[in-house]
Amino acid sequence: MPKIKAKFKSIPTHSISRTVHRLILTRLFFGWLCLSLAIGGIVLWLEVNRVRHFVHELALKESASFSGESAHNMDRLDADARLHLRNLAEQLVNQHFWVVELYDLNKQLQLETIRQGFEVVEHDINRFRHRFPQQGEFSHQFHLMHGKLLLVILVPLLDAQNSLIGYFEGVYQVDKNTLDTIKYGLFRKLMFATLGITFAALLIYPIILLLNRELIRLSADLLKGNLQLMNVLGGAIAERDSNTNSHNYRVTFYALRLGEAIGLPQTDIRDLITGAFLHDVGKIGIRDLILLKSGKLSPEEFEDMKLHVALGVNILNKSSWLQGAKDVVLYHHEQFDGSGYLEGLKGEAIPLNARIFAVVDVFDALTSKRPYKEPWPVTDAIAALEQGRGNHFDPRLVNAFTPIARRLYDEIGGLEEQQIEVMLHQLIAPYFLNTDFERCSKKLCT
Protein backbone atom coordinates (compact mmCIF):
# COMPACT_ATOMS: atom_id res chain seq x y z
CA MET A 1 0.00 0.00 0.00
CA PRO A 2 1.39 3.44 -0.83
CA LYS A 3 2.55 5.49 2.09
CA ILE A 4 -0.22 7.68 3.45
CA LYS A 5 0.77 11.28 3.76
CA ALA A 6 -0.30 12.79 7.07
CA LYS A 7 -2.11 16.01 6.44
CA PHE A 8 -2.51 18.95 8.79
CA LYS A 9 1.13 18.73 9.79
CA SER A 10 1.39 22.44 10.15
CA ILE A 11 -1.39 24.38 11.77
CA PRO A 12 -0.86 28.13 11.23
CA THR A 13 0.06 29.67 14.59
CA HIS A 14 -1.77 32.88 13.81
CA SER A 15 -5.00 30.94 13.22
CA ILE A 16 -4.83 29.26 16.63
CA SER A 17 -3.70 32.46 18.33
CA ARG A 18 -6.55 34.38 16.72
CA THR A 19 -9.10 31.80 17.85
CA VAL A 20 -7.76 31.68 21.41
CA HIS A 21 -7.66 35.47 21.61
CA ARG A 22 -11.26 35.58 20.40
CA LEU A 23 -12.29 33.06 23.07
CA ILE A 24 -10.55 35.02 25.81
CA LEU A 25 -11.94 38.33 24.60
CA THR A 26 -15.46 36.91 24.40
CA ARG A 27 -15.32 35.57 27.93
CA LEU A 28 -13.65 38.74 29.17
CA PHE A 29 -16.39 40.81 27.54
CA PHE A 30 -19.17 38.82 29.17
CA GLY A 31 -17.32 39.03 32.48
CA TRP A 32 -17.01 42.79 32.03
CA LEU A 33 -20.68 43.06 31.10
CA CYS A 34 -21.89 41.03 34.10
CA LEU A 35 -19.58 42.89 36.47
CA SER A 36 -20.63 46.26 35.04
CA LEU A 37 -24.30 45.39 35.44
CA ALA A 38 -23.78 44.09 38.96
CA ILE A 39 -21.66 47.01 40.20
CA GLY A 40 -23.74 49.49 38.22
CA GLY A 41 -26.86 48.07 39.85
CA ILE A 42 -25.34 48.40 43.31
CA VAL A 43 -24.21 51.98 42.61
CA LEU A 44 -27.63 52.82 41.22
CA TRP A 45 -29.39 51.33 44.24
CA LEU A 46 -27.14 53.22 46.66
CA GLU A 47 -27.55 56.47 44.75
CA VAL A 48 -31.31 56.15 44.50
CA ASN A 49 -31.52 55.61 48.25
CA ARG A 50 -29.22 58.55 48.86
CA VAL A 51 -31.34 60.72 46.56
CA ARG A 52 -34.53 59.55 48.27
CA HIS A 53 -33.08 60.52 51.63
CA PHE A 54 -31.81 63.84 50.30
CA VAL A 55 -35.12 64.83 48.73
CA HIS A 56 -37.02 63.62 51.77
CA GLU A 57 -34.91 65.84 54.01
CA LEU A 58 -35.64 68.80 51.74
CA ALA A 59 -39.37 68.13 51.92
CA LEU A 60 -39.31 67.71 55.72
CA LYS A 61 -37.32 70.90 56.12
CA GLU A 62 -39.91 72.92 54.20
CA SER A 63 -42.86 71.28 55.98
CA ALA A 64 -41.33 71.79 59.46
CA SER A 65 -43.12 75.16 59.83
CA PHE A 66 -46.30 73.27 60.77
CA SER A 67 -44.70 71.65 63.80
CA GLY A 68 -42.98 72.82 66.97
CA GLU A 69 -43.59 76.28 68.39
CA SER A 70 -45.79 77.37 65.46
CA ALA A 71 -47.98 74.25 65.58
CA HIS A 72 -51.76 74.49 65.94
CA ASN A 73 -54.05 71.87 67.34
CA MET A 74 -55.85 70.59 64.25
CA ASP A 75 -58.90 69.61 66.31
CA ARG A 76 -59.52 73.20 67.48
CA LEU A 77 -58.71 75.62 64.68
CA ASP A 78 -60.11 79.15 64.98
CA ALA A 79 -60.27 81.63 62.13
CA ASP A 80 -56.87 83.16 62.90
CA ALA A 81 -55.16 79.81 63.17
CA ARG A 82 -56.75 78.59 59.96
CA LEU A 83 -55.66 81.78 58.16
CA HIS A 84 -52.12 81.38 59.50
CA LEU A 85 -51.91 77.78 58.37
CA ARG A 86 -53.30 78.63 54.95
CA ASN A 87 -50.66 81.33 54.52
CA LEU A 88 -47.95 78.84 55.45
CA ALA A 89 -49.41 76.31 53.01
CA GLU A 90 -49.56 78.86 50.21
CA GLN A 91 -45.90 79.70 50.80
CA LEU A 92 -45.06 76.05 50.34
CA VAL A 93 -47.12 75.61 47.16
CA ASN A 94 -45.46 78.70 45.73
CA GLN A 95 -42.07 77.01 46.20
CA HIS A 96 -41.75 73.24 45.68
CA PHE A 97 -45.03 71.72 46.85
CA TRP A 98 -47.90 71.18 44.45
CA VAL A 99 -50.39 70.11 47.10
CA VAL A 100 -50.48 70.66 50.88
CA GLU A 101 -53.08 69.00 53.11
CA LEU A 102 -53.51 69.08 56.91
CA TYR A 103 -55.43 66.44 58.87
CA ASP A 104 -56.59 66.33 62.48
CA LEU A 105 -56.07 63.47 64.90
CA ASN A 106 -59.20 61.79 63.57
CA LYS A 107 -57.60 61.88 60.11
CA GLN A 108 -60.17 64.31 58.81
CA LEU A 109 -59.05 66.88 56.24
CA GLN A 110 -58.90 70.36 57.83
CA LEU A 111 -57.04 72.35 55.19
CA GLU A 112 -56.06 71.85 51.56
CA THR A 113 -54.02 74.14 49.33
CA ILE A 114 -53.32 73.33 45.68
CA ARG A 115 -51.07 75.22 43.34
CA GLN A 116 -53.14 76.91 40.69
CA GLY A 117 -53.44 74.79 37.57
CA PHE A 118 -52.46 71.56 39.33
CA GLU A 119 -55.85 70.50 40.59
CA VAL A 120 -55.59 67.33 38.49
CA VAL A 121 -52.66 66.25 40.66
CA GLU A 122 -54.94 66.07 43.68
CA HIS A 123 -57.20 63.69 41.76
CA ASP A 124 -54.27 61.55 40.63
CA ILE A 125 -52.63 61.48 44.04
CA ASN A 126 -55.64 59.76 45.53
CA ARG A 127 -54.33 56.59 43.89
CA PHE A 128 -51.27 56.76 46.14
CA ARG A 129 -52.83 57.51 49.53
CA HIS A 130 -50.67 56.36 52.42
CA ARG A 131 -51.68 54.77 55.63
CA PHE A 132 -51.53 57.32 58.43
CA PRO A 133 -48.30 56.84 60.37
CA GLN A 134 -47.94 56.26 64.07
CA GLN A 135 -46.45 58.98 66.21
CA GLY A 136 -42.83 59.58 65.32
CA GLU A 137 -43.15 57.79 61.98
CA PHE A 138 -43.39 59.10 58.47
CA SER A 139 -43.96 57.61 55.03
CA HIS A 140 -42.94 58.71 51.56
CA GLN A 141 -43.07 57.51 47.96
CA PHE A 142 -41.59 58.74 44.71
CA HIS A 143 -43.82 58.97 41.64
CA LEU A 144 -43.31 60.16 38.10
CA MET A 145 -46.42 62.19 37.26
CA HIS A 146 -47.00 64.59 34.39
CA GLY A 147 -43.34 64.31 33.45
CA LYS A 148 -42.17 65.45 36.90
CA LEU A 149 -40.47 63.57 39.73
CA LEU A 150 -42.74 63.96 42.75
CA LEU A 151 -42.36 62.95 46.37
CA VAL A 152 -45.57 62.23 48.26
CA ILE A 153 -44.89 62.54 52.00
CA LEU A 154 -47.12 61.96 54.99
CA VAL A 155 -45.67 62.96 58.40
CA PRO A 156 -47.09 63.39 61.87
CA LEU A 157 -47.28 66.95 63.23
CA LEU A 158 -45.98 67.51 66.73
CA ASP A 159 -46.35 70.45 69.06
CA ALA A 160 -43.62 71.96 71.23
CA GLN A 161 -44.09 69.13 73.76
CA ASN A 162 -43.76 66.48 71.01
CA SER A 163 -47.42 65.57 71.28
CA LEU A 164 -49.21 64.44 68.15
CA ILE A 165 -51.57 67.13 66.91
CA GLY A 166 -52.32 66.01 63.33
CA TYR A 167 -50.83 65.02 60.02
CA PHE A 168 -49.22 66.79 57.10
CA GLU A 169 -49.46 65.43 53.57
CA GLY A 170 -47.70 67.10 50.66
CA VAL A 171 -46.82 66.51 47.06
CA TYR A 172 -43.29 67.79 46.68
CA GLN A 173 -41.77 68.50 43.27
CA VAL A 174 -38.05 67.98 42.87
CA ASP A 175 -36.92 71.20 41.17
CA LYS A 176 -35.06 71.09 37.86
CA ASN A 177 -31.71 72.18 39.25
CA THR A 178 -31.82 69.56 42.01
CA LEU A 179 -32.95 66.91 39.53
CA ASP A 180 -30.18 67.83 37.08
CA THR A 181 -27.63 67.67 39.90
CA ILE A 182 -28.94 64.25 40.89
CA LYS A 183 -28.87 62.97 37.30
CA TYR A 184 -25.34 64.31 36.72
CA GLY A 185 -24.05 62.80 39.95
CA LEU A 186 -25.64 59.45 39.18
CA PHE A 187 -24.30 59.44 35.61
CA ARG A 188 -20.82 60.39 36.77
CA LYS A 189 -20.66 57.63 39.37
CA LEU A 190 -21.96 55.02 36.96
CA MET A 191 -19.47 56.20 34.35
CA PHE A 192 -16.55 56.05 36.80
CA ALA A 193 -17.59 52.55 37.89
CA THR A 194 -17.86 51.35 34.29
CA LEU A 195 -14.54 52.93 33.29
CA GLY A 196 -12.85 51.38 36.30
CA ILE A 197 -14.11 47.92 35.35
CA THR A 198 -13.10 48.51 31.71
CA PHE A 199 -9.55 49.53 32.59
CA ALA A 200 -9.27 46.54 34.92
CA ALA A 201 -10.40 44.22 32.11
CA LEU A 202 -7.89 45.76 29.69
CA LEU A 203 -5.11 45.26 32.23
CA ILE A 204 -6.18 41.67 32.90
CA TYR A 205 -6.25 40.69 29.21
CA PRO A 206 -2.45 40.61 28.59
CA ILE A 207 -1.96 38.93 31.98
CA ILE A 208 -4.40 36.18 30.97
CA LEU A 209 -2.57 35.73 27.67
CA LEU A 210 0.74 35.46 29.47
CA LEU A 211 -0.58 32.93 31.96
CA ASN A 212 -2.25 30.92 29.19
CA ARG A 213 0.74 30.80 26.84
CA GLU A 214 1.35 27.16 27.73
CA LEU A 215 -2.37 26.45 27.40
CA ILE A 216 -2.34 27.89 23.88
CA ARG A 217 0.59 25.67 22.97
CA LEU A 218 -1.17 22.60 24.37
CA SER A 219 -4.32 23.52 22.46
CA ALA A 220 -2.35 23.79 19.23
CA ASP A 221 -0.66 20.44 19.79
CA LEU A 222 -3.94 18.77 20.71
CA LEU A 223 -5.70 20.20 17.67
CA LYS A 224 -2.92 19.09 15.33
CA GLY A 225 -2.82 15.63 16.85
CA ASN A 226 -6.56 15.14 16.62
CA LEU A 227 -6.80 16.39 13.05
CA GLN A 228 -3.85 14.25 12.03
CA LEU A 229 -5.51 11.20 13.56
CA MET A 230 -8.73 11.94 11.71
CA ASN A 231 -6.92 12.56 8.44
CA VAL A 232 -4.74 9.45 8.67
CA LEU A 233 -7.77 7.23 9.22
CA GLY A 234 -9.70 8.92 6.41
CA GLY A 235 -6.69 8.82 4.12
CA ALA A 236 -6.09 5.13 4.78
CA ILE A 237 -9.41 4.10 3.29
CA ALA A 238 -9.04 6.66 0.50
CA GLU A 239 -5.80 4.98 -0.55
CA ARG A 240 -7.57 1.60 -0.73
CA ASP A 241 -10.82 2.78 -2.27
CA SER A 242 -10.31 5.66 -4.68
CA ASN A 243 -6.71 6.79 -4.18
CA THR A 244 -7.90 10.31 -3.30
CA ASN A 245 -8.99 12.14 -0.17
CA SER A 246 -10.99 14.74 -2.12
CA HIS A 247 -14.30 12.99 -1.48
CA ASN A 248 -13.75 13.13 2.28
CA TYR A 249 -12.88 16.81 2.08
CA ARG A 250 -15.87 17.68 -0.10
CA VAL A 251 -18.51 15.81 1.90
CA THR A 252 -17.08 17.30 5.09
CA PHE A 253 -17.33 20.77 3.56
CA TYR A 254 -20.90 20.20 2.37
CA ALA A 255 -21.96 18.68 5.70
CA LEU A 256 -20.43 21.57 7.65
CA ARG A 257 -22.23 24.17 5.56
CA LEU A 258 -25.56 22.34 5.76
CA GLY A 259 -25.17 21.98 9.53
CA GLU A 260 -24.53 25.72 9.81
CA ALA A 261 -27.51 26.48 7.54
CA ILE A 262 -29.94 24.69 9.87
CA GLY A 263 -28.40 26.17 13.02
CA LEU A 264 -26.80 22.99 14.32
CA PRO A 265 -25.09 23.54 17.72
CA GLN A 266 -21.31 23.84 17.63
CA THR A 267 -20.68 20.56 19.45
CA ASP A 268 -22.94 18.71 17.00
CA ILE A 269 -21.16 20.33 14.06
CA ARG A 270 -17.84 19.11 15.42
CA ASP A 271 -19.21 15.56 15.61
CA LEU A 272 -20.66 15.95 12.11
CA ILE A 273 -17.26 17.01 10.73
CA THR A 274 -15.52 14.04 12.33
CA GLY A 275 -18.21 11.63 11.16
CA ALA A 276 -18.19 12.99 7.62
CA PHE A 277 -14.44 12.58 7.36
CA LEU A 278 -14.49 9.06 8.77
CA HIS A 279 -17.82 7.83 7.39
CA ASP A 280 -16.29 4.94 5.43
CA VAL A 281 -13.38 4.14 7.76
CA GLY A 282 -14.78 0.62 8.24
CA LYS A 283 -13.99 -0.21 4.61
CA ILE A 284 -10.42 -0.83 5.78
CA GLY A 285 -11.69 -4.19 6.94
CA ILE A 286 -13.45 -5.12 3.67
CA ARG A 287 -11.67 -7.58 1.35
CA ASP A 288 -10.13 -6.10 -1.80
CA LEU A 289 -12.10 -8.56 -3.89
CA ILE A 290 -15.29 -6.82 -2.81
CA LEU A 291 -14.05 -3.30 -2.16
CA LEU A 292 -12.27 -2.92 -5.51
CA LYS A 293 -14.75 -4.86 -7.64
CA SER A 294 -15.61 -2.83 -10.74
CA GLY A 295 -18.91 -4.51 -11.44
CA LYS A 296 -22.10 -4.91 -9.47
CA LEU A 297 -21.81 -6.77 -6.17
CA SER A 298 -23.65 -10.04 -5.72
CA PRO A 299 -26.20 -10.24 -2.85
CA GLU A 300 -23.66 -12.12 -0.73
CA GLU A 301 -20.94 -9.58 -1.51
CA PHE A 302 -23.28 -6.72 -0.72
CA GLU A 303 -24.01 -8.24 2.69
CA ASP A 304 -20.27 -8.36 3.30
CA MET A 305 -19.96 -4.72 2.17
CA LYS A 306 -22.60 -3.70 4.72
CA LEU A 307 -20.26 -4.86 7.46
CA HIS A 308 -18.09 -1.79 6.93
CA VAL A 309 -20.56 0.15 9.09
CA ALA A 310 -20.04 -2.09 12.13
CA LEU A 311 -16.31 -2.31 11.44
CA GLY A 312 -16.11 1.46 11.40
CA VAL A 313 -17.73 1.70 14.82
CA ASN A 314 -15.28 -0.87 16.18
CA ILE A 315 -12.41 1.28 14.95
CA LEU A 316 -13.89 4.43 16.51
CA ASN A 317 -14.26 2.67 19.85
CA LYS A 318 -10.49 2.67 20.13
CA SER A 319 -10.49 6.48 20.59
CA SER A 320 -12.64 8.46 23.02
CA TRP A 321 -12.07 11.59 20.93
CA LEU A 322 -13.78 9.99 17.91
CA GLN A 323 -16.94 8.85 19.71
CA GLY A 324 -18.92 11.79 18.31
CA ALA A 325 -18.46 10.40 14.79
CA LYS A 326 -20.47 7.25 15.57
CA ASP A 327 -23.85 8.62 14.46
CA VAL A 328 -22.61 9.26 10.93
CA VAL A 329 -20.46 6.14 10.64
CA LEU A 330 -23.15 3.80 11.96
CA TYR A 331 -26.26 5.31 10.37
CA HIS A 332 -25.20 7.06 7.15
CA HIS A 333 -26.74 4.28 5.04
CA GLU A 334 -30.13 4.49 6.76
CA GLN A 335 -32.92 5.98 4.64
CA PHE A 336 -35.76 8.22 5.72
CA ASP A 337 -38.46 5.69 4.75
CA GLY A 338 -36.77 2.90 6.72
CA SER A 339 -35.38 0.98 3.74
CA GLY A 340 -31.70 1.53 4.59
CA TYR A 341 -29.24 -0.50 6.64
CA LEU A 342 -28.03 -1.73 9.10
CA GLU A 343 -30.94 -1.17 11.49
CA GLY A 344 -33.65 -0.01 9.12
CA LEU A 345 -34.33 3.14 11.14
CA LYS A 346 -37.05 5.45 9.87
CA GLY A 347 -37.63 9.21 9.90
CA GLU A 348 -36.31 11.15 12.86
CA ALA A 349 -35.27 7.94 14.59
CA ILE A 350 -32.18 8.31 12.40
CA PRO A 351 -29.71 10.68 14.16
CA LEU A 352 -29.74 14.15 12.64
CA ASN A 353 -26.03 14.11 11.73
CA ALA A 354 -26.53 10.89 9.77
CA ARG A 355 -29.50 12.42 7.93
CA ILE A 356 -27.42 15.48 7.07
CA PHE A 357 -24.57 13.37 5.78
CA ALA A 358 -26.87 11.19 3.65
CA VAL A 359 -27.90 14.26 1.64
CA VAL A 360 -24.42 15.64 1.02
CA ASP A 361 -22.87 12.22 0.40
CA VAL A 362 -25.25 11.48 -2.44
CA PHE A 363 -24.84 14.99 -3.84
CA ASP A 364 -21.07 14.66 -3.96
CA ALA A 365 -21.24 11.14 -5.40
CA LEU A 366 -23.48 12.36 -8.22
CA THR A 367 -21.44 15.48 -9.05
CA SER A 368 -18.03 13.73 -8.92
CA LYS A 369 -16.22 11.74 -11.57
CA ARG A 370 -15.88 8.06 -10.73
CA PRO A 371 -14.20 5.22 -12.67
CA TYR A 372 -17.62 3.93 -13.65
CA LYS A 373 -19.34 7.28 -14.46
CA GLU A 374 -18.96 10.91 -15.47
CA PRO A 375 -20.03 13.69 -13.08
CA TRP A 376 -23.67 14.75 -13.20
CA PRO A 377 -24.58 18.40 -13.78
CA VAL A 378 -25.46 20.14 -10.51
CA THR A 379 -29.05 20.71 -11.67
CA ASP A 380 -29.50 16.97 -12.27
CA ALA A 381 -27.99 16.14 -8.88
CA ILE A 382 -30.34 18.60 -7.18
CA ALA A 383 -33.25 17.07 -9.05
CA ALA A 384 -32.20 13.64 -7.76
CA LEU A 385 -32.20 14.95 -4.20
CA GLU A 386 -35.66 16.39 -4.73
CA GLN A 387 -36.82 13.06 -6.10
CA GLY A 388 -35.47 11.29 -3.02
CA ARG A 389 -37.28 13.66 -0.65
CA GLY A 390 -39.26 11.73 1.94
CA ASN A 391 -38.00 8.28 0.96
CA HIS A 392 -34.19 8.45 0.95
CA PHE A 393 -33.72 11.90 2.51
CA ASP A 394 -35.19 14.04 5.25
CA PRO A 395 -37.41 16.57 3.38
CA ARG A 396 -36.44 19.39 5.76
CA LEU A 397 -32.75 18.88 5.03
CA VAL A 398 -33.33 18.71 1.27
CA ASN A 399 -35.19 22.02 1.55
CA ALA A 400 -32.22 23.54 3.39
CA PHE A 401 -29.51 22.15 1.11
CA THR A 402 -30.84 22.58 -2.43
CA PRO A 403 -30.88 26.42 -2.33
CA ILE A 404 -27.19 26.53 -1.38
CA ALA A 405 -25.96 23.47 -3.30
CA ARG A 406 -24.97 25.35 -6.48
CA ARG A 407 -23.03 27.99 -4.55
CA LEU A 408 -21.18 25.39 -2.47
CA TYR A 409 -20.33 23.31 -5.53
CA ASP A 410 -18.97 26.36 -7.34
CA GLU A 411 -16.93 27.27 -4.26
CA ILE A 412 -14.90 24.05 -4.24
CA GLY A 413 -15.63 22.45 -7.61
CA GLY A 414 -12.55 23.86 -9.32
CA LEU A 415 -10.11 23.46 -6.43
CA GLU A 416 -7.31 20.94 -6.20
CA GLU A 417 -7.25 18.51 -3.27
CA GLN A 418 -4.58 20.50 -1.44
CA GLN A 419 -6.54 23.76 -1.86
CA ILE A 420 -9.69 22.13 -0.50
CA GLU A 421 -7.67 20.81 2.43
CA VAL A 422 -6.34 24.27 3.33
CA MET A 423 -9.76 25.89 3.04
CA LEU A 424 -11.41 23.11 5.03
CA HIS A 425 -8.83 23.43 7.79
CA GLN A 426 -9.59 27.12 8.17
CA LEU A 427 -13.29 26.32 8.50
CA ILE A 428 -13.12 23.42 10.93
CA ALA A 429 -10.23 24.46 13.20
CA PRO A 430 -12.32 26.83 15.38
CA TYR A 431 -14.89 24.11 16.06
CA PHE A 432 -12.25 21.76 17.43
CA LEU A 433 -10.06 24.40 19.03
CA ASN A 434 -12.90 25.82 21.12
CA THR A 435 -13.57 22.44 22.66
CA ASP A 436 -9.93 21.45 23.04
CA PHE A 437 -9.20 24.82 24.63
CA GLU A 438 -11.92 24.15 27.22
CA ARG A 439 -10.55 20.67 27.87
CA CYS A 440 -7.06 22.04 28.40
CA SER A 441 -8.45 24.72 30.70
CA LYS A 442 -10.11 22.11 32.88
CA LYS A 443 -6.96 19.96 32.98
CA LEU A 444 -4.73 22.85 33.96
CA CYS A 445 -7.19 24.05 36.59
CA THR A 446 -7.50 20.65 38.30
Image (cartoon, helix red, strand yellow):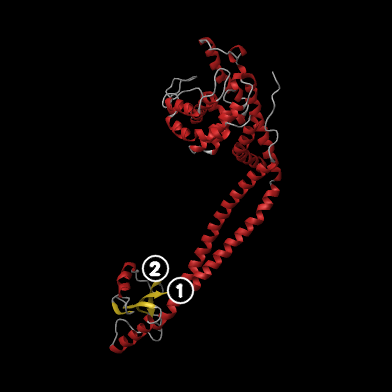
Give how far apart the Cα atoms at labels 1 and 2 are.
Answer: 13 Å
- Please tell me which residue is depicted at 61% across the width and 47% down the height of the picture: 22
Q: Is residue 102 left or right of residue 221?
A: left
Dot 1 falls on a residue whose secondary structure is helix
Instruction: Where is residue 177? Give x, y as percent.
Output: 47, 76
Q: Residues within 10 Å of mark 2 (few under 14, many from 20)?
A: some
Q: In this view, does 377 lie to the left or right of 25?
A: left
Dot 2 falls on a residue whose secondary structure is strand
Q: Mark 2 points at which residue?
A: 143
Occupied quadrant, residue 347: top left
Quick check: 381 above or below 422? Answer: above
Give the quadrant of the C terminus.
top right
Q: How crowded is mark 1: few (under 14 residues within 10 Å), some or many (20 or more)?
A: many
Q: Nearer the viewer, residue 446 or 229?
A: 229
Q: Nearer the viewer, residue 322 or 35?
A: 322
Q: Mark on residue 188?
A: none
Occupied quadrant, residue 384: top left
Instruction: Where is residue 96? Give x, y as percent.
Output: 40, 78
Instruction: Where is residue 174? Give x, y as percent.
Output: 43, 74
- Res 350 visible: no
Residue type of the residue flagged with mark 1: Val
Q: Is residue 17 left or right of residue 365?
A: right
Q: Name the residue under label 1.
A: 55
Residue type of the residue flagged with mark 2: His
- Res 97 visible: yes
Occupied quadrant, residue 439: top right
Quick check: 30 above or below 244? Answer: below
Q: Which of 228 and 375 is in front in this view?
A: 375
- Please tell me which residue is depicted at 66% across the width and 54% down the height of the picture: 204
Instruction: Where is residue 358? Give x, y as percent.
Output: 50, 26
Give the quadrant of the N terminus.
top right
